[in-house]
Every structure is written in structure tokens, then in C-alpha cells.
Amino acid sequence: MARFALTALAFLLLEVLAVNAGDDNNDNSPYYGGDDNYPVYGGDDGDCDNNPYNFTFLADSGVFGPPLEVVHAYFGEWPNGVSVSSTGRIFSNFPAIVLGNVNNGTPGVFAVAELTSPSTEEAYPSEDINTPPCPGGAVNLTDPENPVGCGSPDHFISVQSVQVDTEDRLWILDTGRPIYTLPDGSVILVNSSYGGPKLVGVDLSTDLVFQTILFPEDVVFPDTSYIDDFRIDLNASLSNTTGEGVAYITDTSLWGDNAIIVVDLGTGDSWRRLEGDPSVVAEPNFLPFIWGQPLYFTEDPANPPDGNLTTTTPAYLPAGVNGLTLSADGETLFYADLAGRDLYSVPTALLRERDDAVEAELAAAVVNYGNTGFSDGMETDPETGFIYKGSIEANAVVAFDADTGMTQTVVRDPRLGWVDSLSVAELEDEETGETQSWLYISSDQFDRSWWFWAPGAHSGDIQERPFGLFRVPLPLPDPDCEFAGASNY
């Protein structure tokens, strides 16, 4: 009898743990519908039934936290970064590292755009600045045997990141390095030309460029640098500066030339710090898992590997320091490698030192917070000081508290396919006049681009439009309150 009683109890527990799909609607999309019912993993009388006993088991719902609100759907070019102004204007950038994003010298393909409706974008600040004038457009084909990035200082070539500063001005980081298809069909990332790599400031009150800072070739290397993300600090009392602000930029170099680049916005001077430090270089043989698949790097995206590991020698993601953000007081810079899961920080005062002799002191001052998850973009909550960062392998965004060293999930949703960029904005409700802080989240499926492959699963470009921009309200929900997904934990 005891055995039968235990068996009955076991079945009861299985029923309690069964997924109850479809009870709640977790969709918060005013523009696009969605089916938010998650499957019950149980029996099926169909021909493909592998559960003839009709058992049901606890399954991961894939969701946690407040429901995502859909802000924008990108049906055209592949998006990357996002930044939101204090008035709610939203800007995105579109790097020329996929073919559809490379401008050939004619209007229509933009590097920076303002989002003008839930599904449309418009070249920003003008169509002209987004149309490089070189023969070939973004790729200078003056010498067809030696294609290079267009060196026009007045035009965008391949924009990797955008940021709105505290004075509501938009800053734009141009790598100057688009891709190009060679006559044999292979694809390369061309070298930059002086005038291509630059930091451009646009006044949002006039929509005009007010500053352009060009990077010298001994700071941004034409053949091995790939400047990726940046943050602006306009504090007038910053040490070793002219008082007009500083930019901190990551060099994500795929060739090991990684560093943090510092720029004095007053003079335009720039210099490299933490050059080759272990904290800024890619972790060897780094292997992320996304949607259950190990993800390898594609060295020639036009000729992606296929098959499995018995037929193809894998390449690993070689990208170093990538995402970064400043502490709320600006005294600490947090950063992480794209090929890695550890989070690091360093005092910004040491980064601003001009004397190269500071490098030893700087390296000793690096703090490693350990594994906080595989991530790309980061952002700081100015109110709490929390660091928000994507958790790409979990389809999530997490919050990191540097004071405690702890990480907490903010939101998780299957639609968050490669969280690339984050932006915090405090906006006023036009009807009530009340303010609300929002965390904007871009999801761009970068793992499904032609730069990656999963053995036995996929290779080549398998991205599906639309790409998504979402948001969730801040501050974080009270853990004692009920919100979507809480019952699953």
C-alpha cells in the first residue's frame, strides 16, 4: 500500500508542476499582436507522440519580469544601437557589416536614423550625411584592387553606436570600416581611411552637426581597430581635461589590438589605455550557447561553414572589450569583452592620465567582478546605480549591483534575441504630466547573422524581420508583488 500511495503522490506532484499555458496574456504590444501561450509538454494522440502516457512536466516558460512593451519594429536595415532623448526622440544606427547596410553612394541606405513611427525610420540628421561621396559610396573604389573605407569626415561610413548626452545632444561613433565583396565572392572588412573613424555631435534642437572629432591612425588603427561602444561624461571638473567633457570608447578589435580609447571633447585629443590588458582581450576559445546551440565565428561570412564538427574546424569569437557604461557618479568605468562573461571596472581618473607611465597603475586598479553573463550593451540607472546589461544566453536583461556584487534578472522573454543596446530615459506623460523612467532594449538577432554558425543547426544569414525595440518601466518591480513570470520561480 505504501508503494501505491507514493506513486499516487508522485503523480499528484507532477500535476502540480505542470505548465499551465495561456492563462495570462503577457503581450504589451500596442502595434503588433502576438501569441503568448506557451506549450504544455504533455501527451498527444498524433502520430508523432513520444509521450504515450500523457504525462505533463514542468517546463521553462521563457518569461520573467514585467511584460515587454513593443516600441518599434525594424522591417528594413539591420539595427544595432539605440538612444533616447529627454523628449522621447529615438535614434538607431545601422552598421555596414551586413550587405543591406552598405551605402553604394546613392540615397536610401542610412547609417543613422530617427524612428518616425512604430515601423518606419528616416535618415538622420540628413540624407546627405548618410550618403558617402566616394566612388563606391561607403567603400572607396578609386583603386579597385585596394578597396578601403571612404575617408569623408562629413559623411557617415559605418556607424556602430549612438548616445544622447545629458545636454540632449546626439553623439555618433563611426568605425569607418564597412564590408566589401571581393571579385572571388569572399567578404572582407575593409581598412579605414583617415576621416572615416570619427565621433560626431549633433544638436537635437537644430538637427545640425556641431562637432566632428577625427581619430588619428595611431589611435584607431586602419587595419586592426574596430571601435564599438562609447559613453560621454560632460562633468566640467574632470581631471586632466579642458572641462568640456570626455568620451570613453571600446576598441573591440578582432585581431587582439584591444584598448579603451579616451577623448577630450574640448581639444579632440585622443589616446589609448589598457592596451592589450587581459581584461580587454577576448577569452580564448570562448563558446556561447544561444537558443541551445553552441555558437562559432564565421571568418568569411560569404562562405559560411556547414555540417558539423567532424567536417569543419571551428573558429571562435575573437572580439575583445565591447560593452561599457559609467557609474552614476562618473568615477568608474565598467566594461566587458564580447568574447567573455566577466565584468570589469577601472577608475576613470586613471584613464584620463595622458602619461603612458600610468599603464602599470591602471592595470593594477582593474577590478574583476567575475561571471555576470555573456553580454553586449550596458547602461546605468542614474537613480539606483544599477548596471543593466544583456544576458544574451538567457534572452534576458539583468541588473548588476557593484556594491553587493550580485546580479538580478530584470526581464526575460523569448523575443529578446541578442540584446544589443540599452538606453534609460525619463519621459513626461503628455496627458498626466507625470514622469516615468524606461529601459529601452534593442533585440537584433546578431547571432543569426552570417557572422556566426551553429554546427548541425544553422549557418549563413537566417535573421527574420522585424527586429525589435522594446521597453520596460523602471524602477524594478517590488519582489513581493506579483508580476508576469513570478509564479514560475
Image (tube, rainbow, N blue to C red):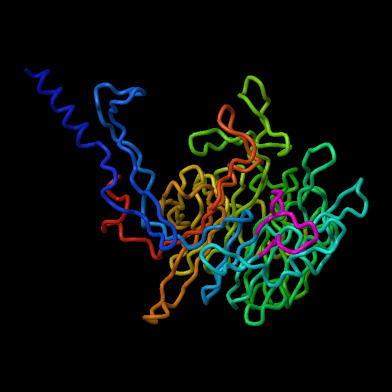
393 on left or right of 279: left
Provide the residue span drawn in magenta: 94-112
- The prevailing secondary structure element of the residues shown in magenta is loop
Asked if the stretch drawn in magenta spans residue 102, the answer is: yes
Q: Is residue 301 above or below residue 168?
A: above
Residue at 27% from the left image edge and 21% from the top image edge: 52
Q: Quadrant of the N terminus?
A: top left
Q: Is residue 341 above or below residue 362?
A: above
- The part of the image, by quadrant, that contains residue 429 is bottom left
Q: Is residue 357 visible?
A: no
Task: Give the image location of residue 234, x and y in percent.
Answer: 63, 74
Asked if the stretch drawn in magenta spans residue 413, the answer is: no
Task: Give the image location of residue 259, x and y in percent.
Answer: 71, 52
Q: Nearer the viewer, residue 17 or 448?
A: 448
Q: Nearer the viewer, residue 391 or 239?
A: 391
Quick one: which residue is furthest to the left in this view? 1
Q: Quadrant of the C terminus?
A: top left
- The part of the image, by quadrant, that contains residue 298 is top right
Task: Give the image location of residue 487, x and y in percent.
Answer: 27, 48
- The part of the image, by quadrant, that contains residue 218 is bottom right
Give the total of numbered labels: 0
